[in-house]
Amino acid sequence: MDFKQDFFEQLPGFYETVAPAGLPAPSWLAWSDDAAVLVGNPQPDEQLLQQLAGNQRMPGANYYAQVYSGHQFGGYSPQLGDGRSIILGEAIGPNGCWDVALKGAGATPFSRHGDGRAVTRSAIREFLVSEALFHLNVPTTRALAVIGSALPVWRETLEKGAITVRLARSHIRFGHFEYCYYSTGGKREQVQQLADFTIRQHFPHLSCDAAGYRQWFVEVVEATARLIATWQAIGFAHGVMNTDNMSILGDSFDFGPFAFLDTFKEDFICNHSDPEGRYAFGRQPGIGLWNLQCLAQALTPLISSDDLLAALTHYQPMLVQHYLQLMRQKLGLPAPAGEASGPEDLALFGAFTAMLEQQQLDYSLTLRQFATLDPVANHSDLRDMFVDTSAFDHWFTGYCKRLGKVDNIEQWQEARRLNNPQYILRNYLAQKAIAATEAGDTAPLQQLYQLLRRPYDAQPGCEDFARRPPDWGEGLIMSCSS
Ligand SMILES: Nc1ncnc2c1ncn2[C@@H]1O[C@H](COP(=O)(O)OP(=O)(O)OP(=O)(O)O)[C@@H](O)[C@H]1O
Ligand SMILES: [Mg+2]
């Protein structure tokens, strides 16, 4: 891998240099060829293994941990920083640069009381979901590899240490700006330095002046709104939407107790440590705005309050517009001529998900049924999924009215197939692959990963992967200490 060191060279004071502690007896547990292409197609050989395990120096790399802070569960934590993630620099790829981070590489000056480690379970979950979201067209950080080891690490039980090699377009979080703002008592210099860097690197069409800063924040608001609309449409609960886990580029970032919905449930909570459901599935849109408000506060030295408030007003319309667009694609509704049908379509989608929730139906499997639906000639397979068929009939009548005439049913079905995945990363599937890997067999992890690379293509012999959990209702929320 070839590196450049823009963050390291241009932002001294925003990180601490560190030495990775290394991993004993490292081995490849997973590798993403797709992600490898992004950083110049390195091969997973023994030398690269030792380098990414932190046992040998990587030529051209620096080793540093970034400082940031953030609002966690509503309260401000003044100094967080990379406590278990070491960044090597920006790897140069054919279509841009990617930060390479070793998540779980050992303690840093920001580890506080933590051990700086990740475990096999959490590293595999991060790997699988990063790549799964990418193939579902959700903006996300990527994962190049998981490296396992013999290192004992205590969580609730004794586990093994592992590293996820994360690729990110940027590791800059909302929390980076909050750190600059709060640690300097709201002075402009550091906030501006970081904003200028972010704009130069990632928003090169904007200038570093008052007009540029204003427009930049609008674009951050809109990217965040689109991200969360995408999560809501795909049925993804992140679980830890603290501002230190919000990417400034609107990429899904930091995967801990996440879950894809099985049964549709608006107030689904995937995080054991969130009994009040601050980050429940249905609250994600509101939390996105709350987090942007925190970011806006941190940008007050740079952008006027009026401009910040004006930018925030873009959030809801953008989120709704994007959600409508994605749901129309899922359900096969034509784009409306004007914006007039927005509220009607929202009501139609809301009635659909409410019906799924009432009847305890699986979100993704029900949507996938639209890939074989013929609204005029045969809708019995879809209808048969519902217990309360009269509620379904009522909804379906409204749906057909909105749908109108479908000219080419095969084409329409194919488009539904390409918008409603057959395979999603259900927790129980991840858990099975993890258990096998921990027992020394990586084949199930490989098989699951290969399915998630092509989530829309039904694979013969893989019907089991397209089922909801056999024991759904119990064990749905995983223990996710990472
Ligand atoms: N095992 C650990 N050792 C040291 N610090 C940790 C550990 N686990 C979490 N932290 C730190 O606690 C804070 C919040 O953790 P959080 O789970 O959001 O992040 P993370 O998953 O460790 O990393 P990232 O956000 O980079 O994906 C971060 O500062 C993180 O570095
Ligand atoms: Mg985090």
Image: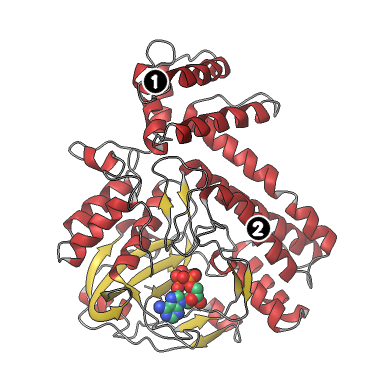
Q: Secondary structure at mark 2?
A: helix
Q: Which mark is residue 69?
A: none
Q: Position of residue 411 (x, y in %)?
A: 41, 22
- Bin the neighbour count of mark 2 within 10 Å (Cα to Cα): few under 14, some 14-19, many 20 and up: many
Determine which residue is flagged by label 1. 383
- Work out whether residue 25 can be spotted: yes
Task: Name which residue lies at 75% across and 81% down.
Answer: 189
The residue shown at (33%, 38%) is: 422
Pointers 1 and 2 in contact (C-beta within 8 Å): no
Locate residue 154 relative to residue 389 in the image: left or right.
left
Residue highlighted by disc 2: 220
Side of 32 where 257 appears, left or right: right
Q: Position of residue 54 (x, y in %)?
A: 32, 82
Colour convention of the picture:
secondary structure
Question: Measured along the vertical axis of the image, is residue 134 above or below residue 348?
Answer: below
Q: Nearer the viewer, residue 387 or 371?
A: 387
Q: Residue at x 67, y 59 (%)?
A: 290
Name which residue lies at 34% across and 66% down: 122
The amino acid sitting under disc 2 is Val
